[in-house]
Amino acid sequence: MALLELRRLNKHFGGLHVTNSVDLALDAGEIHCLIGPNGAGKSTLFRLILGEYHPGSGDIYFAGENITPLKSFARIHRGLSVKFQVPGVFKGLSVRQNLEIALQSRHRGVGLEREIDGLLSFLGLAAEQWQTAGNLSHGQKQWLEIGMAISLKPRLLLLDEPTAGMSPEETYQTGEMVQRLNAEGMTVLAIEHDMAFVRQVAQRVTVLHLGQVFAQGSIDQIVADERVAAIYLGQAHG
Amino acid sequence: MNSMRILLRRLEGPQTVGRGPAFWSLFVLVLAGACVYPLVADGYTVGNTVYFFVWVFIALSLCLIWGYGGSLSFGQTAFFGIAGYGYGILTLNFGAAYGFTLVALLLAVGIAAFFALLLGYFMFFGRIAGVFLGIVTLAVTLTLERFMAQTAGPEWHIGVARLNGFNGMSAMPPLTIPWPGGDIVLFADIGLYYLVLGLLVFVYLGLRILMNSAFGNVIVAIRENPERAEMLGYDIRKYQLITFIIGAALAGLSGVLYTVWGQYITPSSMGMTAAALPLIWVAVGGRSDLTSTLIGTLLVLAAFQALTIYGSQYALVFMGVLLVLTVLIAPNGLVLGAMNLLSRFGMRKAEGK
């Protein structure tokens, strides 16, 4: 059964059709990567799924429920979670407090402290726990936000460029982490430009182009698709 | 018992400066000093100190909404006025017998809170934020002032209470505690002093606990990044609205106590100057910390009053300069900056460097 299903989803800003009749079904338990050139509408699609934008038409189903009318926080309660493109940590607060805010709605007291400690060591940020989150390196901020996102124990994790600004080694580690989470049953939808990462984790890939689903398949199928190569080189407009 | 211990532990935390035995010893010392103070000072000075204390509540309310919540509100002054007038209208109509003044205090604060519920609902659920929130709240405050300013005629009255325009509403009874063998009337000296001091300690400690709780965590999270906070599953509109209502109640408490103190209130207490001054106290003290706000407000008020003796307009200019200097030198607040410096110095000393 599809965990997330987008049905003929449309969004336009004035005359600009950013999301154009997108149909997309995500199976429970898969790692799905969303790729496409800049301006393809990937981040807009995320905002639609999260309820930050409301579609002009079309519906979004999550676990069989039509969540299109729901507000963002209600969608989070249903089991969605996100790491934004620009790291959205609470910059003025300590690393530990960032995680506390993410975890406190489900844990209290000693249990909460234990969960925070566990997550800190999982993220490799134990030494930085008292630092102000704004002072972390870019990669560490990414990790911290991923930590906050997964601490909600979501059924579907949305990752918008999780490895941007990371070294190849860090990118690989992030890939391993995503696979570990997936092995525990988390479905993942990731926007990513780093093809090494996509190759490492993706079980299925969707190519978005000019707001439409352009191609879909395994990474090998996508790489072999000449039309996909063409849009990345800017030749498919004609 | 257990929940009591949790509450006490929340007196300290990441959202409030000041922790450990040193801080709390100092706190007790200052409190003891404040308790003894009326016994050694003359009645006028004590009454004047009450006047300073009265303003701390509105400052703390702004600290809560602006410093912790990140929403700059000029509306505190409106709630101040609503509650102040509310107390006047209630007590002028129903008198002071059977402890009604205390009921009127609570009702007036309640009216301000209810008004905040209405205004806040439309603002926060309409997703008004940032500078627009400041504009809307300022407009509400000034509208109220303009409205009250034109109520000088005898046709403007609620029951027997004349609104009286810029002549002000006056002669409302002071707070009166019913007591067997004669009511205790809290005039603006020792009696009112202890009540206001008690309220101040209660509100200060209560806000410390609130801000270091899970609720406070969400409030500062919304200040830091509202989008992220919502995407952690928090309905940020509700948190903002609740904070706004608590803030309005505190500002309203200021308004009632001010009215009780002087037995007088005018529309100018909701004017532009009145709306701007709390901002300066809070900014100069350190808006993101309760203790800094409290100390800063008292210091600035005392300085302002001292200067006013030499010319009230110059005192206002000085306030403006003070705000500009604060923004340039210590954007987080002068008192907060000084306290952080002190604690760093203390820590270095403790480490023996």
Image (spheres, coloured by chain):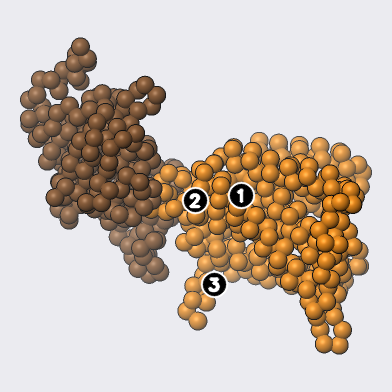
Which residue is denoted by mark 3 in the rendering? B8
Chain name for mark 2: B
Chain name for mark 1: B
Which residue is denoted by mark 1 in the rendering? B119
Is residue B1 shown left or right of residue B173? left
Q: Is residue B16 above or below residue A142?
A: below
Q: Residues within 10 Å of mark 3 (few under 14, many from 20)?
A: few
Please name the amino acid that badge 2 sits on: Arg
Q: Residue at x 62, y 66 (%)?
A: B205
Of the chain colours in the picture, the one used for chain A is: brown
Q: Farthest residue toward the bottom?
A: B181
Q: Residues within 10 Å of mark 1 (few under 14, many from 20)?
A: some
Total numbered badges shown on the rendered structure: 3
Q: CA distance from mark 3 to mark 1?
A: 33 Å
Which quarter of the rendering shows the C terminus of chain B? bottom right
Percent coordinates x, y for residue B243 in the rendering = 57, 56
Percent coordinates x, y for residue B311 in the rendering = 91, 42
Same subunit, labels 2 and 3: the answer reads yes
Query: In the figure, residue A200 lies in which quadrant?
Result: top left
Q: Say which element carries label 1.
A: helix
Q: Residue at x 83, y 73 (%)?
A: B96
Q: Nearer the viewer, residue B341 or B248?
A: B248
Q: Nearer the viewer, mark 2 or mark 3?
A: 2
Is residue B96 shown left or right of residue A86? right
Precedes in sequence: disc 2 or disc 1: 1
- Callout 3–callout 1 Cβ contact below 8 Å: no
Q: CA distance from mark 2 to mark 1?
A: 13 Å
Q: Which chain is orange?
A: B
Q: Nearer the viewer, residue A92 or A65?
A: A65
Q: Nearer the viewer, mark 2 or mark 1?
A: 1
Mark number for residue B237?
2
